[in-house]
Amino acid sequence: MKKIFLLIVICLQALFVSSSPYNDLVSQGNKAYTDGKYNAAIELYQQVISKGYESSALYYNLGSAYFKSKNYASALLYLEKARKLDPSDDKIDFNIQVCNTKIMDKIEELPQPFYKRWIVQFRQWFSMDVWATMSVVFLFLFFIFIAIYLMANTIRIRKITFWAGLIFVCISIVAGINAYSQYSNIHLAREAIIFEPTVNVKSSPDPASQDIFVIHEGTKVSITDKVGTWIEVRIANGSDGWIQETAAQVIQ
């Protein structure tokens, strides 16, 4: 089932990309990347993004070009953008892990309960679009089987359609929840990459406040609050504090 839905999405993406007015720029960027002209590839990909087009593949290619040019903060920014759009792509995760070995901060994440890890892994089986499509398709099948149930003349058919309809509506609900969860992660969750070489994290949104720890370029943070030009950030080990918002670029 997973492979079938992935095949459908890949076909739709291929059709969309082939009809994109920016396909020539993307192709030129891909050629520049293949030829080792990474700065030229970055410029071409950025032209496409500046026109409002986005895709996980485009962000992945741009992140890879930045990685090759040793701009690891920018590489992480665009690889994280790619992962938001397609959390099921293992190669994006792998490249993020490789990129993280190149930055200064090596922060251990807080351990999660096993059931939370399972839920996250399950939600990342498919992208948001695939989960949403599954929700609509199985809801449609549910209504079809309910109609058959209401018109059936035998107990056997009514039992089959009842249980099939129940299964379909449960799948539709689960898929809808996963689609909304990924939508929230893309559009509501606030994360950022540090873009300054060294950032002193403050205890409060005041330049005179105490420095509580230091983070460096390329570190990923979660944004938990904002006051004026200050943002409260939390790093993977749970430590939090305040920095100037200009020190980071938001992953949108």
Image (cartoon, rainbow, N blue to C red):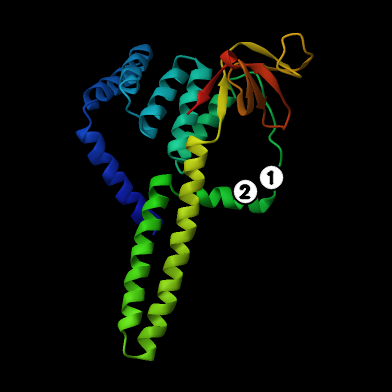
Q: Is residue 245 visible?
A: yes
Image point 71% across, 32% down: which residue? Answer: 237
Q: Please provide percent x and percent y for residue 175.
A: 46, 56
Q: Nearer the viewer, residue 143 or 53?
A: 143
Q: Would you name the residue on which mark 1 appears?
A: 112
Q: Nearer the viewer, residue 234 or 80?
A: 234
Judged left or right of residue 3, residue 197 is right
Q: Please provide percent x and percent y for residue 78.
A: 46, 25
Above or below residue 3? Residue 81 is above
Of helix, strand and loop, which one carries label 2? helix
Residue 217: name its quadrant.
top right
Q: Please provide percent x and percent y for residue 98.
A: 54, 28
**Three-letter amino acid code at disc 1?**
Gln
Q: Which quadrant would the N terminus be assigned to in this image?
A: bottom left
Residue projecting furthest to the bottom: 154
* Label of residue 97 in the image: none
Residue projecting furthest to the front: 228
How many discs mark residues in the rendered view? Answer: 2
The answer to whether marks 2 and 1 mark residues whose Cβ atoms lie closer than 8 Å is yes
Judged left or right of residue 191, residue 243 is right
Image point 41% across, 74% down: which residue? Answer: 164
Crowding near pointer 2: few (<14 within 10 Å), some, many (20+)? few
Of helix, strand and loop, which one carries label 1? loop
Crowding near pointer 1: few (<14 within 10 Å), some, many (20+)? few
Compare marks 2 and 1 and give the one earlier in the sequence: 1
Q: Would you name the residue on which mark 2 appears?
A: 117
**Three-letter amino acid code at disc 2?**
Arg
Residue 141: name its quadrant.
bottom left
